[in-house]
Image (cartoon, rainbow, N blue to C red):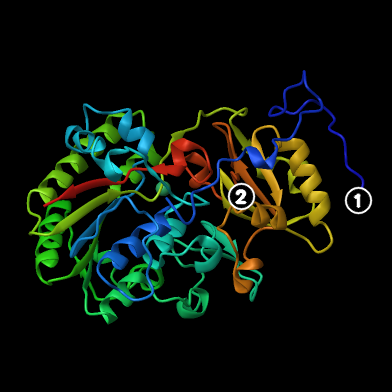
Amino acid sequence: MAQPTRPTPPSHTPAWDPHPEPLPLDSAPLPEYGSGSLADLLPTLAAGMGVPGMSAAIPELTPTDRNCVFLIDGLGWEQLKAHPDAAPFMTSLLASSRGGTGRPLTAGYPATTATSLASIGTGLPPGAHGLPGYTVRNPDTGELMNQLRWQPWTPPGAWQPYPTVFELAHRAGVHAAQVSSPAFANTPLTKVALSGGTFHGRLTGEERMDFAAEQLAAGDRSLVYTYYSEVDGSGHRYGVDSDTWRGQLMYVDRLVQRLAEQLPPRTALYVTADHGMLDVPFDEQHRIDFDEDWELKAGVALLGGEGRARHVYAVPGAANDVLTCWREVLGEQFWVASRDEAIAAGWFGPAIDERVYDRIGDVVAAARDDVLLIASQREPNESQMVGNHGSMTPAEQLVPLLEVRS
Ligand SMILES: [Zn+2]
């Protein structure tokens, strides 16, 4: 297919540079799979409790009998560090995190909730658990599947066949529990990512903290997960530079302190997140619209992922042309890789399961700059979000790992 030329300089390519150099793929900061990613946390804690088959990938964490993970959706390391006044308690924990190194964890790619929850719960990178995006193509149906909402419904056990760490811990006699919103009690995402032991729905943050502390005390060895969503929600709606977001940060800081003050003996509480976030300006330079760009649309059968982490599924035979075109149009602001290049570079982990291979786009595009590839018609709601995440930049990839021990 011949490459069409643009009739006028497009808004998102600087007119003064008609031949931008694409970003080299090895300049993408990869997640620290195997030593410091979200997928390494639960296996490390479970290994410390003697659960068979688990290994301590994060050696700085000292084993203990009771472990709690409090996941704050959307609270990146950089955003936490930028707001010490709004989060005095968590800020006081920074110095002691990860054995005093103050280092964060990396979320994994893409830095999005469904992917990260599966990485945490299964202890596996995305290439193995098989939730490699916000939306990905189901190779069996050829349709896009939303991994967060699990739409259209797909058999969960076939999509993600591995047992979770909670399940393995439960089988080994550890008291395992999840304390989260009642809305998530029976969702397929909970089933594939967080099941094992007992799920307890509690409506408010305070109830979750109090009940998580009770659950920790309920076993001699216990593994408890709890969750709060609205830091992410307010960031999407109002941005991470908004009063609403800072208000949420202040609230969740008090939740962390409330839980920390109730820990039973021999407990470690770990506060972490599924991803960070960054605000993207509302103009055509920062929000490139796929639905309005005939060049980007050429040869594309399905657009998956999200604004900062796209999976592009080409019509049969067009994958190379789509890759060439996307690299030319977006390659200065996005890392644009073929499926095989992204896999070989380790974006999704050290290896990829065969069943996951075709879920990855023929072309994978990850934003480096504060830009989005929106789709104003296909994704009207997502295209209006102020705060966004998904890619490999530190703002979205780095998440805290704060530790409190009783
Ligand atoms: Zn989000």
Residue 1's disc number: 1
Under tag 1, what secondary structure?
loop
Identify whether 215 is placed above or below 113. below
Q: Amino acid at mark 1?
A: Met
Q: Amino acid at mark 2?
A: Arg
- Residue at position x 79%, y 56% from top? 319
Q: Position of residue 357 (x, y in %)?
A: 65, 67
Q: Give neighbour class at mark 2: few <14, some 14-19, many 20+ (Cα, 10 Å).
A: many
Under tag 2, what secondary structure?
strand
Q: Which residue is mark 2?
A: 310
Extreme-top residue of the structure: 16
- Residue at position x 18%, y 65% from top? 65
Extreme-right residue of the structure: 2
Identify whether 372 is placed above or below 162. above
Q: Give neighbour class at mark 1: few <14, some 14-19, many 20+ (Cα, 10 Å).
A: few
Residue 325 position by quadrant: top right
